Structures are given as structure tokens and as C-alpha cells.
Image: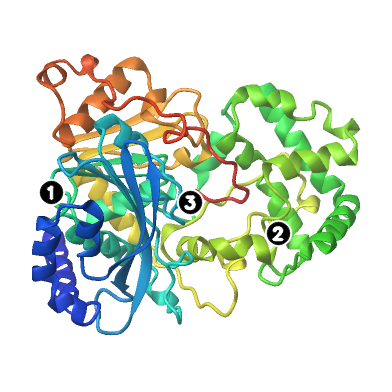
Amino acid sequence: MRKALTWLLALTVFIGTLGTAGAATAAQPEARRTAATATDIKDRLLAIPGMSLIEEKPYAGYRFFVLDFTQPVDHRHPDKGTFQQRITVLHKDVSRPTVFYTSGYNVSTTPGRSEPTRIVDGNQVSLEYRFFTPSRPDPADWSKLDIWQAASDQHRVFEALKAVYPHRWIATGGSKGGMTATYYKRFYPRDMDGVVAYVAPDDVVNDQDSAYDRFFTTVGTKECRDRLDAVQREALVRRDTLEKKYTAYAADNRYTFTTVGSLDRAYEAVVLDYVWGFWQYSKLSDCATVPADAKNATDDEIWNSVDTISGFSFYTDQGLEPYTPYYYQAGTQLGAPTIHFPYIEKKYLHYGYQPPRNFVPRSIPMRFRPGAMRDVDTWVTHHAHQMLFVYGQNDPWGAERFRVGAGTRDAYVFTAPGMNHGANVAGLVPGEQALATARILDWAGVASPAVRSDPSAARPLARYDARLDRTGMEREPGLRP
């Protein structure tokens, strides 16, 4: 039954694709022939119907293009409007494999390589997730923001670019991007030759999040956990004093709190993100920067520690607005963590962990659909093929993760010891690192005979480039994958 449904959805998208983007689609076969026969890569890309150039940026050894691609707002009804979706292409050579990357959020318009792109020494196509600006339909029908529509965006981009890049493709992404790559494989299992999903949460049952509570009782060391817990509690004990500082801070920066409802709600949300945010972005060694004696710390020391890790600007209207699409999805399909704080007395907690609904303007309707994640989880658990999941030992988002079971083939789940939300293949123990690298090379069709016979010989094919291969994470406030 599931195979029949997948086939029906794929057929629906195929039929819809024929009518997308108006008259441009009618010329698609001829344009594809032009794209295949043109010599300059820019000409080939721009010969694709619906593709337009925003800018080309030079980078040694590559060509880098920022483009717009015309997409239907609704892949089930492609005649009901289109929007421009931002993509970038880091072009190496049409004879190389291609990595399809998405962060699940905005796309960067600065040249960069994902880890799989460096491993296979390939091209990289990066896609902005629908409804993140500027890739947002106008007017925005938020009911068209779901994981199937987003997977169908990727499918159309792949179909459009396959004639230009005819060799193997691998989908990848980190965090929400890893989730996105997984959902794409679930709905269009034949598009990609492999998937490398980093730190991808799998919130199967949204109202059962005890795995997160267990995680926070064992992560790191007791000394570090106690420091963090004490600062978090102290920030709530001193709520009246620190909220006066918050009020002045908001006034100075013209911040408002209409979406979340009040400054008090925003303050508690920031403070309750503190422990999670530390483990998501910091290393165990960073515990040395956390006040050791919270009760005797100054107000500024408590404020600065919370602001550095959680960010008092985030739950303002101005901080939340760019991430409305994420919170909408968290509250309609993806789910969101709900954790508890046994070391904080109830009198200090006014709201507890707030649901995604509180972070989306009330003008946008939301209804949670619990079947979406159960469907994906079941598919991955029993049908994953040529998929690799990488998690960080100290990353809270890995507490609920994808697993592979009976029925899966050539699928792996690895954990990088001591790593946080920036976990990658390079951070795995040597045997798993070699195996993961070898599988990625093989899926991309560029594994040497030596690697195929002995995975320990596997190495990235491209040299490290400090500008292209930035591995450090940019700390982003707010509880988001």
C-alpha cells in the first residue's frame, strides 16, 4: 500500500510539473537539449526553464552561481501560482558527482562546501527551504508549507539539473537540513544515490519527550551540569531584577513582544533554553566559562552568561520573524521538544517550555498532524537504503534520533564521541570514519578499487580549504534544530 501511495504521489508531481511555470514548461524538452549541448556552464544553467541568474561570484577552481528557480506554490495544483526559490550552484565539473545540500532554512550566497562535497570532490547544489525569505510565495498560503511540498521542490530542482549534472547525486544537510534530506529520500526514494544526514532529530511522538529529560541527567560531567542548572535557576530567582534590565535592553533596541505575548514570556523562554543551548553549541571544556557559584554571581554575570548562550534578542518579534517557517512546521508536522526542570521550584516557572504555537503570529492558522513523523520514522526504520546518519554524543537533538532496523540496506547510524550539534564524519572514531567515507565515495561512484576492497583506505578526494570548508558552527540563539 505504501509503495502504491508513493507511486501515486510521484505521478501527481510529474503531471503537475508538466504545467508548472506557464509557457516555460512547454519548452522544457527543447531547453533541456540546449542545456545539454551548450558549452559554458552558465549558459547551460540558464537554458533550464524557470532558471534565472542573480549573480556569479568567482572562486578559484569553481564557478559559483546564485540563481532563482520558478516553483509551483502547490505541487498538487501547479496551475495555482508560482514563486521564486533561491538556489546556488558550486560548479566543479559536469563529469563529477553532485551533492544536493539544504540547511532546511535560508541558503548562503557565499561559496562553501558541505563535508560530502569535499569527500567526493564534486559539485554542490544548495536549495533554500520554501517560505524562508526571499523564497516565500506572495501571498503566503502557509498550508502549502509541509515536508512533502518541500521534498517536491527538491525533486523538481533535481529533475531540472540532472541533464547538466548527469552523474550520481547525494543529498545532505545538517540538523533541519538532515531532516529535509531524509524526508526527500522518503518521498522520492529513486532520485538520490545516497543520503548523508547530520544531527537530524526524529520526534516520532510529540508528547513523549522523556528521552530528552534522560539526556540532561547524564550529558557531560556532574560538575558541568550542576553549574549550568544553578545559573539557569538563579536567572529565574532574580527574575524581577533581570527583567528590568531586559526592559531597558528591549527599549534601547526597539524590540517588541507581540508574537510571544509579553516580555515575561520571552524572558522565561530565553532562560529555559540556556542548558539546551550550551550543550547544542558548546564543548565540555567551555564549562569553565560558566559562573561556578551562581548564588554569589553578580546580576551582570548571570545576564551575560544567559545572553551569550541563549540570546535575549531571540524571542522578540524581530528575532522570531526570520524563523516563522520553522516554528510553523514544528507546530504542524515536525514536533518540538518538551523538557522538564526538576531542579527548579514550580514557583519560579510561569510557563514552562512553550509550544511552537507561541512563536508564530496568531494570524497564521496551525494544526498539528501527528502522522507525518510516524510515517517517515517507519519508512527509515524499515526501508532506508544507502543512508548515513551522524549524531554528536553531547548534542541534545540526538536524544531522539533516526534508527535503522530490519529491512534496511547499506544504512548506518554513527555517533561522534564528545561532539555537539556540529558532529560530522571527521569526528567519528577511526573505523567508523573510514567506513562512512568509503560508503559516501561508493554511493557517489568515485570509490577507487582500493577503497572498495578496504574501507580503511578511504580519504576525502578534495584538499581542505579553510574558506570553503568552514567547520565551526555559528551560534544561533533559540531552540531550533
Q: Considering the numbered disc 2 on the image, is that residue within a helix, a strand or a loop?
A: loop
Identified by mark 2, the residue type is Tyr
138 horizontally vs 189: left or right: right
Q: Which residue is mark 1?
A: 166
Horizontal and vertical percent position of residue 34: 11, 63
Mark 2 neighbour density, 10 Å: few (under 14) some (14–19) many (20 or more): few
Residue 217 against residue 162 in the figure, above or below: above
Identified by mark 3, the residue type is Gln
Residue lying at 72% horizontally and 29% vertically, measured from the top left: 226
Mark 3 neighbour density, 10 Å: few (under 14) some (14–19) many (20 or more): few
Mark 1 neighbour density, 10 Å: few (under 14) some (14–19) many (20 or more): some
Residue 266 seen anywhere in this rendered image of the structure: yes
68 horizontally vs 263: left or right: left
Labels 2 and 3 touching (C-beta < 8 A): no
Using the rendered view, name the quadrant where residue 17 is placed.
bottom left
Residue 325 against residue 454 in the figure, above or below: below
Mark 2 or mark 1, earlier in chain: 1
Q: Which residue is mark 3?
A: 208
Q: Which residue is mark 2?
A: 351
- Count of numbered tags: 3
Mark 3 or mark 1, earlier in chain: 1
Identified by mark 1, the residue type is Pro
Residue 423 against residue 429 in the figure, above or below: below
Labels 2 and 1 touching (C-beta < 8 A): no
Given residues 117 and 313, the one toward you in this image is 117
Q: Considering the numbered disc 1 on the image, is that residue within a helix, a strand or a loop?
A: loop
